[in-house]
Image (cartoon, rainbow, N blue to C red):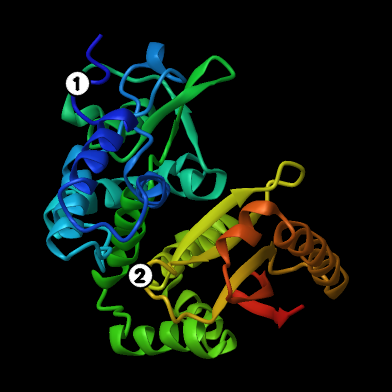
Amino acid sequence: QFNEMTGFTEKDVRDMLEYYSTTCPFNHSVDELIELMKPWYDNYCFAEECYGRSSMYNSNMVLYFIDNYVHSGGNLPRYMIEENIRVDYNKLRMLIRKDKEFAHDASVIQTLLQQGYVTGELKTGFPAESISDPNNFVSLLFYFGMLTISGMHKGETKLTIPNQVVREQLFAYILDTYHENDLTFDSYEKRKLASGLAYDGKWKPYFEYIAGCLHRYASQRDKQKGEYFVHGFTLAMTAQNPFYRPVSEKDSQEGYVDLFLHPLLDIYKDMRHSYIIELKYAKGKDSNERIEQLRRQAVEQAERYASSESVQKAIGSTMLHKIIVVYRGMEMVVCEEL
């Protein structure tokens, strides 16, 4: 009965927007603003019995957005995340460090990034020394707001990352764990590469930079995780791009990751390029024939995904690039545009 107590329903958000639209300058319709806010702030469920009835918006983030929109005369906020809302860095760093200590087949965060969800039993309480139990770790991520209830899967509670705000935080902190070993990413270079991707269509230097970082920073434990690590690292790096919202979708047949860089045209109206990336992974000992097989699979999936209604609607007037990336172990061996 308390599921809707700690957030806003979509009706709450709509009512607020409709009220302010009568008293303040609005350059967007209420429906347009809801469509923009939903993937960033919505999708929380706090009780298994309530899944599917309604989802909750993060109230702090909604108020941050409306406050900025109203006081800027109807302009969208440049940043969709308020700094003060970020989960305490030390808490999350502790969680990710603890997760990396698990056996590679029990890595909750890697499974989450690769598969899109995890399953487990939500515990109502547990001692700190039992955090290494996977169910306890999943429960802690849920109580920190990093996971939300998304139904049931094979008799267990299914949990997913609720929205883009949480996804960006999680990816940012995963990358930050590499900084602990004095392995730093050049933020100036990353920004230049991101700008070149969005405005000049220079996609190859961007993915070569990611591949170079991945190759340099992969530990022996990361290499054991193989596909999980390559996918997770690439997603984390693209999540740092300020011009796009990365949308990762699991293919229903093969389970491979489609990555669509959704252009933030509401904020960067002069952007020219958008991207679909098909990312494939082969083991270090796999043959060239296996690489070619994966490349052909990627081509088929990219063509299918590019023609989907959701992608065509999102790209606006930008030019859509379909990029094929194949790794063999920690080495990128294919990087091409269809």
Residue that protrudes farthest toward the right in the picture: 289
Q: In this view, does 223 lie to the left or right of 74?
A: right
Q: State whether residue 330 is above or below residue 302.
A: below
Disc 1 marks a residue whose amino acid type is Met
Q: State whether residue 109 is above or below residue 257.
A: above
Quadrant of the frame with the N terminus: top left
Q: State whether residue 94 is above or below residue 259.
A: above
Q: In which quarter of the image is residue 268?
A: bottom left
Disc 2 marks a residue whose amino acid type is Ile
Residue under numbered circle 2: 267
Helix, strand or loop for disc 1:
loop
| Dot 1 or dot 2, earlier in sequence | 1
Residue under numbered circle 1: 5
Q: Residue at x 41, y 47 (%)?
A: 39
Quadrant of the frame with the C terminus: bottom right
Residue 269, position in %: x, y? 42, 76
Q: In this view, does 61 lie to the left or right of 234?
A: left
